Image: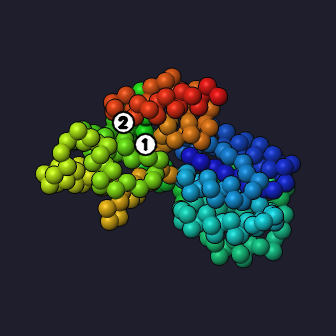
Amino acid sequence: MNIIAVDDEPIALRDLEYTVLKACEKLTKEQTDMSGINLLCFKVADEVISFAKKNEVHIAFLDINMGSMNGIDLAKSLKGINSNTNIIFVTGHKKYALDAFEVRASDYILKPISVDAITQAINNLRFPLRNTLSKKLKVQCFGNFEVFIDNKPLHFPRKKAKELFAYLIHRKGSGCSTMEITDALFKNKENNLSLQSHVQTVISTMIKVFNDLDITDIIEKKRNNISVNVSKIDCDYLNFLQGDPLAVNSYIGEYMLNYIWAEKTSEQLTKKKEK
């Protein structure tokens, strides 16, 4: 679960970070669904938007009076990326409350903040965490490629359907054409009508796996272009690229051992870790 805290004043941001962490600790002890908390702090709005485009943000604590972009405009941008993001404004001014209501904020907290105020805000989110996290996929790329839902392995009826999903993860969310998929998964096969039909079957099978689980926002398919929505998954490889210490430490030189096309990436990750 990704929580972000945004304030352009360093002291205020540290105070917000400390208070949010204390509130999360309290909620965890009360057995509220606060599993896998990842709290990130930002001082610049552009960095927030860049992060949100690549990662799902579940809760955003936003100051309002900031430099290049105020908190209200930032909230609108976050909602444009993911309408289910819970916005909680943390400000020293009452006058923006109506604006906060218009962007469907979950709460409006006046400074100085307290653990109780943050706790209450999280307990009364507009989009409850139990709903947003219930279908979260976990993807393992280090070692053999595996996919889990609710900590149980996800079954793909065709090996190539699983490999296709691995390849889309490997592409980090960028779109792939049918030709690119064919070249990657069937490199030594003659590209004829029979193979093209088989590729379409593989794509349909992969999509059906997620549709059957009522996970319809993982795969994004347009005409002759298919990609994976990386903000909807928890993936060691993608976390590694974001500099997550746990993911970096978990990498021991093995990446998608199931697939030949992944060999060069393993070398690149090893060099990146050694820097």
Kindly report which numbered mark, 1 or 2, lies closer to the viewer in this rendering. Answer: 2
Query: Left or right: 205 with respect to 56?
Result: left
Residue positioned 75% across, 67% down in the render: 69
Query: Horizontal and vertical percent for residue 265?
Result: 46, 34
Which of the image's four quarters has the C terminus? top right
Query: Residue tagged by mark 1?
Result: 170
User: Can you say whether 115 is above or below 85 in the image?
Assistant: above
Tell me how far mark 1 sits from mark 2, CA to CA: 10 Å
Quadrant of residue 247 within the rendered picture: top right
Q: Earlier in the sequence, mark 1 or mark 2?
A: 1
Query: Horizontal and vertical percent for residue 227?
Result: 40, 54
Query: Horizontal and vertical percent for residue 66?
Result: 80, 63
Residue placed most toward the observer, 111 or 59? 59
Residue type at mark 1 is His
Residue positioned 37% across, 28% down in the render: 257
Quadrant of residue 25 within the rendered picture: top right
User: Can you say whether 134 is above or below 126 in the image?
Assistant: above
Residue placed most toward the observer, 162 or 257? 257
Residue type at mark 2 is Trp
Q: Which secondary structure lies at badge 2?
A: helix
Query: Residue tagged by mark 2?
Result: 261
Query: Horizontal and vertical percent for residue 245?
Result: 62, 32
Mark 1 touching mark 2, by CB under 8 A? yes
